[in-house]
Amino acid sequence: MHLKNLFRAGILAGLSQLPAALTASERPDEVRIAVIDDVPSTTAAVQILETAYQRLDINMTTLVAPSRRALLMADSGKLDGDLFRIETVADGYPNLVRVGFPLLKGKLHVVVRNREIQELPESHADDPLKVAVRRGVIIAENTAKALGMEPIHAESYEQVRTLLEMRRVDLAFVASIEGITPLANSDWHHLHILPEPVASFTLHHYLNRHHVELAEELAEVLAQLEQEGVRDQILRTVRGQQKDEEW
């Protein structure tokens, strides 16, 4: 083989071995995104992302899966991404790329039975406080462990409330995401919410690393939706509907 042809063949072989993230990629026509449950905050996030993807001429579909299975499916490439996570959760999944513009922001509230309690009770190692947390809300699970409490998992916020009412737990952690929270429901009004949240958090959308360029485009579109007021309109609509939703 001529030397020039050998050189050309070597270049082509090298290019063929480049990682997928370094080669040119076409924008997909459709993405499949994992979600952990169909609750009002999830509904809001899905509507915001559907709008963003539509602006990029991409159809977004969702698949409900348990929290950690959803992460694994997005990380392995079986799905294109995960709806939203706090940053520290995604640290353990190297194939996930964070969409830079925040999707939603939230707070984690402490709920107790006694209205005289104004500060978070202290938990002791020999007798840790039991706290009800909704399964899959990893910020609640991590916060409970960081405070030395024993998390008691529930499958819904209704179960969280029942555990607290039945004195099976000492307190409960309940999320409020952009003002969307089960605490707005009258079923919670006989319980007491401590004045200060126990944690604040930011939720980002995550995509598999094969969509790294799409993640950058999507961040720009999400910023546009906020500037245009589209995001706030979606959130206002969902807040108005949340009292009729099952938590």
Image: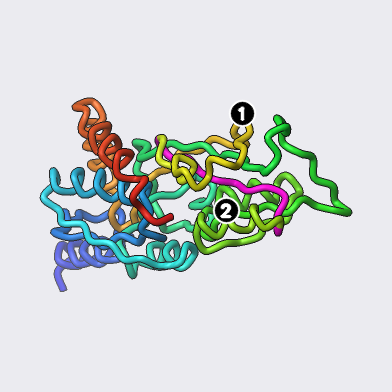
Location of mark 1 (residue)? 195
Asked whether residue 206 appears in the rendered view, the answer is: no
Location of mark 2 (residue)? 161
Residue 181 forms part of the magenta stretch: no
In terms of secondary structure, what is the magenta stretch mainly?
strand
Q: Quadrant of residue 119?
A: top right
In the displayed structure image, the side of residue 20 where residue 112 appears, left or right: right
In the displayed structure image, the side of residue 228 where residue 194 appears, left or right: right
Q: Where the C terminus falls, by quadrant?
A: bottom left
Q: Residue at x 70, y 46 (%)?
A: 146
The picture places residue 223, in percent across and down from the top left corner, at: 26, 31
Q: CA distance from mark 2 to mark 1?
A: 18 Å
The picture places residue 235, in percent across and down from the top left corner, at: 30, 37
Mark 2 near mark 1, Cβ–Cβ under 8 Å?
no
Q: Earlier in the sequence, mark 2 or mark 1?
A: 2
Image depth: mark 2 or mark 1 in front: 2
| Range covered by the magenta-colored residues | 168-178
Name the amino acid type tagged 2: Arg
In the displayed structure image, the side of residue 199 where residue 44 appears, left or right: left
Residue closer to the observer: 36 or 109: 109
Asked whether residue 90 appears in the rendered view, the answer is: yes
Element at label 2:
helix
Q: Residues within 10 Å of mark 1 (few under 14, many from 20)?
A: few
Residue closer to the observer: 93 or 16: 93
Residue 170 forms part of the magenta stretch: yes
